[in-house]
Image: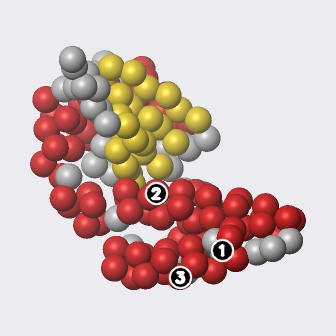
Amino acid sequence: MKRIKQYKKLFNIEGSIDLKELKKTYRSLVKEWHPDKFLEEDKKAEAEIKSTEIIDGYHFLVSIAPETKEANLEAYKTTITEFKVADWHHKSMLLEVTFTDGNSYEYFGVSKILFGKFVNAKSMNNFGKRNIFNSFTYRKSMKASVNA
């Protein structure tokens, strides 16, 4: 959640994410903080850090935007209903779950207590569907593995 708030603040977003507005703000921030605009080395270094943050923030916010989630909803539903949980990691309110189809999703705001219940549940898939997968802000964190 901290990351979401940080990036929303960077892009001056209040409430829901609008992709058109986000793109417009992104372009203006990239122009403002482009490292080639600065001659002094310390300012150039600061601009490189800031521009990296802007790029990361943009891609992150696009991935959790309602339009992006809506476009990928069918694939997400297929993953959480037809495939089992293969792996999971929890760190500081962020739960990353990898499914047997190779897709991984990050869930934001999952407490340590809820994570403990998830791991110790009789069926992680059922518990996840009831309490996590449809309740928390999520984003796809890794593309499905491509089999050669």
Quarter of the figure with residue 98: top left
Q: Of the two numbered discs 1 and 2 on the same chain, state the one appearing first in sequence.
A: 1
Quarter of the figure with residue 32: bottom right
Q: Is residue 19 left or right of residue 77?
A: right
Q: Is residue 49 left or right of residue 25?
A: right
Mark 1, Cα crowd under 10 Å, few <14 / some 14-19 / many 20+, is many
Q: Is residue 68 left or right of residue 78?
A: right
Q: Which residue is mark 3?
A: 28
Residue 140 x/y as whole percent: 35, 44
Q: Of the two numbered discs 2 and 3 on the same chain, state the one appearing first in sequence.
A: 3
Instruction: Identify the element where label 2 is drawn.
Output: helix
Instruction: Identify the element where label 1 is drawn.
Output: loop
Q: Is residue 66 visible?
A: yes
Q: Is residue 83 left or right of residue 9?
A: left
**Depth-wise, is mark 1 or mark 2 nearer the camera?**
1
| Contact flag, marks 1 and 2 (Cβ < 8 Å) | no
The Cα atoms of the two marked residues, 2 and 3, are separated by 17 Å
Disc 2 marks a residue whose amino acid type is: Phe
Q: Which residue is mark 2?
A: 60
The Cα atoms of the two marked residues, 1 and 3, are separated by 9 Å
Q: Which residue is mark 1?
A: 33
Mark 3, Cα crowd under 10 Å, few <14 / some 14-19 / many 20+, is few
Color encoding of the figure: secondary structure
Q: Residue at 38% of width from left, 62% of height from top?
A: 62
| Contact flag, marks 1 and 3 (Cβ < 8 Å) | no
Above or below: residue 22 compared with residue 68? below
Above or below: residue 6 compared with residue 87? below
Residue 75 x/y as whole percent: 16, 44
Q: Of the two numbered discs 1 and 3 on the same chain, state the one appearing first in sequence.
A: 3
The Cα atoms of the two marked residues, 1 and 2, are separated by 18 Å
